Amino acid sequence: MVIYGVALLAGCMLVGLVIGDVLGQLLGIDANLGGVGIAMLLLIFVTGYLKSRDHLPESTESGINFWNAMYIPIVVAMAASQNVAAAFSGGMVAILAGALAVVLGLAMVPLLTGKRVEDAMPLDARPVSPAQGRTP
């Protein structure tokens, strides 16, 4: 049913927000630290797990897809409502957390896509081994 997809999304959102609040408190920042991002990652992992085991019916997936269409406006609204001034009053912790998130996100792209660095290079830029040789 569609409502199960919405419930799954809501559950991931609640867990992500709680984890973000706990992270903020652990680091001494009076703000949610990445709760929405954690919720979206949790939703990706949970739906992937359920799909791999054939426990995610099409109707449930349509409930998730409904909110996918609403994702950007919701995230923009939530980001606007967060207390950015409180996060920056934490000093370098907020800047380091942001930089670390960006670096880890970039490092995870090849792992999540399953591509190697050699696969990303254009064919004409790849080194040619002597065994292959080039035909003139």
Image (cartoon, rainbow, N blue to C red):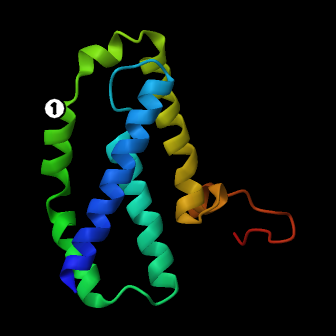
Q: Is residue 121 visible?
A: no
Q: Which residue is situated farthest in the right direction here?
A: 131
How many marks do you count on the picture?
1
Left or right: where does residue 30 sit relative to residue 107?
left
Please identify the quarter of the rendering in which residue 21 is found. Answer: top left
Q: Is residue 91 left or right of residue 100?
A: left
Q: Mark 1 Cα within 10 Å, few/some/many (few <14, many 20+)?
A: few
* Residue 76 sits above or below residue 85 on the image: below
Q: Quadrant of residue 29?
A: top left
Instruction: Tell me the residue at 31%/69% (across/down).
Output: 8
Give residue 60's position: percent from left, percent from top.
27, 82
Can residue 94 be seen in this snapshot?
yes
Splitting the image into 4 quarters, where does residue 130 fall?
bottom right
Is 81 or 119 nearer to us in this picture?
Answer: 81
Vertical side of 64 occupied by 110: above or below: above
Element class at badge 1 = helix
Quadrant of the image containing the N terminus: bottom left
Image coordinates of residue 98 in percent, x first then y, are 43, 28
Across and down, in percent, residue 114 comes to: 59, 66
Q: Which residue is mark 1?
A: 80
Instruction: Where is residue 61? Give x, y as percent.
Output: 28, 80
Q: As displayed, is residue 63 above or below residue 118?
A: below
Look at label 1 and name its amino acid.
Ala
- The residue shown at (87%, 70%) is 131
The residue at the point 69 percent across, 69 percent down is 136
Q: Nearer the viewer, residue 88 or 30?
A: 30
